[in-house]
Amino acid sequence: MTAAEEYRVDPPTVGTERELLQAYLDFHRGTLLWKTSGLTGEQLTEKAIEPSTMSLIGLVRHATEVERYWIQICLDGRSFDLLKTWSQEFPDGDFDLVDPERVEEDFADFRETTKLNDEILAGYDLDHTFVRPRVGTEHTVRSLYFHLIQEAARHNGHADLFRQHLDGSTGE
């Protein structure tokens, strides 16, 4: 088994719309875990591309907050208090407040959040609509899947660059 296979499964090319959307989201979640695997806390928190405050663990924390925000708060109507790294005081806390000693907690939070989010998503029809709080835009669960997939794919491109900078590793 390769490192990539340990964290992700290629999405199917045939299936229901829901199966395909979930598989692509899972693929990109797994890609992020693959890109961050085998590194030290110091490597994971290194801010290697100035002036950005991004780091690999920051990308994990960002992905966690994005999913928590869109699925738990926007779709499922839960409290904004669920946000752990974003605040008025630290709007980029997911990137700015990283700690090499907390990376395992950050990975655990990502895994727990995505598991809960999958359970929440499964409870909604793809055509279900919801209104994004404080913004007022209407979305469907289908469009939410597309948004999360493109968000994850974009940040996996960032993760590629960070990983190559840190240890020369490349891959799709």
Image (cartoon, helix red, strand yellow):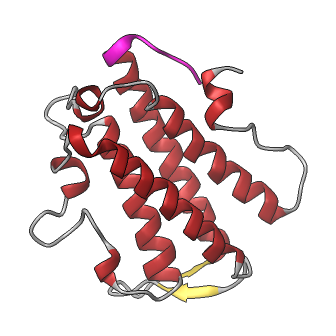
Residue at (53, 43) in percent of width and height: 153
Front-lying residue, 169 or 109 = 109
Residue 43 drawn above or below residue 167: below
Q: Is residue 116 left or right of residue 104?
A: right
Q: Is residue 109 left or right of residue 84?
A: right
**Quadrant where the N terminus is found in the figure:** top right
Q: Outermost residue, right direction? A: 14
Residue at (25, 62) in percent of width and height: 85
Magenta part, dominant SS: loop
> Range of the magenta residues?
166-172
Q: Quadrant of residue 100?
A: top left
Percent position of residue 86, x then y = 24, 66
Q: Outermost residue, left direction? A: 89
**Quadrant where the C terminus is found in the figure:** top right
Q: Is residue 170 magenta?
A: yes
Q: Outermost residue, top direction? A: 168
Q: Is residue 134 left or right of residue 131?
A: left
Q: Looking at the image, how many numbered discs can be counted on the residues? A: 0
Q: Is residue 164 magenta?
A: no
Residue 132 drawn above or below residue 111: below
Percent position of residue 28, x then y = 59, 44
Residue 52 drawn above or below residue 69: above
Residue at (73, 38) in percent of width and height: 9
Q: Quadrant of residue 21?
A: bottom right
Percent position of residue 68, x then y = 43, 69
Q: Quadrant of residue 135?
A: bottom left
Residue at (21, 29) in percent of width and height: 46
